[in-house]
Amino acid sequence: MYDASTAADVHPAPRRRRPWLRVFLTGLALWLLTVVVTFATGNPNLVPTLVLLGSFLVPVTFVIWAFGRRHSGEVTAELLFTTFVSGGVLGVLAASLLETYLLHPSPGLFLGVGLIEEAVKLAALAFLTRRLQQKYARDGLILGASVGFGFAAFESAGYAFTALFTEQGLSLMQVVQTELLRGLLAPVGHGLWTAILGGVLFSASGREHFAFTRRLLLAYLGVAVLHALWDSMHSIALLVTLVLTGTPYQYQLLERGYQPEPTPEQTHLFTVLSWGGLIVVSIVGIAWLFRVRRRADQEARGLLWRIPTYR
């Protein structure tokens, strides 16, 4: 007589593999080890290793996690690697050029940054995936996230390297703090915004060619606004703090064109407003992403219904 429980003991169900988790834990252990050895030895040759490991750990982990949720076989590991590296580099270079020559200090500076960076990431995504025969919205989410996380990784490496240099000399602590902060915020930054654009771009397109529709334009403008709010949250929080609790001396500094720092009494309010604003922007972005994902799932089910069956 067949005993299902005995068979289950002899042939246990295979455990679900989580390569993204192994990559994250291994990378985190290597980064922590690099931090310890760098501080212990003061060896400057280890700084590039510290910067690269810290900057790429979270973006690479999220891309690997997303790869396991792709819709079609056309989204290969090679394509994902290409969008991450080439898309990230092209985006950073194009954004740097455009921001240098088009933007100047003004109240609209952060909005300009958002418009430029989201445009170059969207353009890089469209260029690198133009040869896909079938453009499914779920794949657009994944490939968009790949471009966005690639952009974030290279940008974070630049910020971490810049943080090394201070008025007091080289500061490894500043590098570590910068990488921890940017690693913590990476999932709700560039990767999230470009994932939204990728999902909309692919769902608004035909099966072979991209279509730049009104919905895509509105998504681009909306994501650029989220990007601008994210970048300007420090200034927004400071402005609200000054409106609520500002001192005459701080108002005088503002009138002279200087940005005053919060007083010790204002620090708590400023911190709450700053982090609270980032959380609100993140929640809006995540909710929007889920909405795009839900539409992608509906599209996938619709395609399955249209596939003819033969009996």
Image (tube, rainbow, N blue to C red):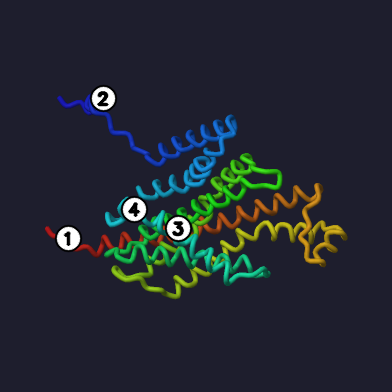
Q: Which mark is residue 9?
A: 2
- Chain-order first, disc 3 or disc 4: 4
Is residue 3 toward the left or the right of residue 287 in the image?
Answer: left
Q: Which amino acid does label 2 sit on?
A: Asp
Q: Position of residue 74 (x, y in %)?
A: 28, 57
Please indicate, yes or no, whether residue 223 appears anywhere in the rendered image: no
Q: How crowded is mark 3: few (under 14 residues within 10 Å), some or many (20 or more)?
A: many
Determine the image quadrant of residue 115: bottom right
Residue that badge 4 annotates: 70
Residue that badge 3 annotates: 89
Q: Position of residue 12 (x, y in %)?
A: 27, 29
Q: What residue type is labelled 4?
A: Arg
Q: Distance between the residues labelled 1 and 3?
A: 44 Å
Q: Which amino acid does label 3 sit on?
A: Val
Q: Which residue is drawn at 82% across and 58% down?
A: 246
Q: Distance between the residues labelled 2 and 4?
A: 33 Å
Q: Position of residue 97 (x, y in %)?
A: 53, 66
Is residue 279 toward the left or the right of residue 201 in the image?
Answer: right
Q: Residue at x 22, y 27 (%)?
A: 7
Q: How far apart are marks 2 and 1 (CA)?
A: 38 Å
Q: Which structural element holds mark 2? A: helix
Q: Image height check: is 303 above or below 1?
A: below
- Chain-order first, disc 1 or disc 3: 3
Q: Residue 203 carries which label?
A: none
Residue that badge 1 annotates: 309
Q: How crowded is mark 2: few (under 14 residues within 10 Å), some or many (20 or more)?
A: few
Is residue 77 toward the left or the right of residue 237 in the image?
Answer: left
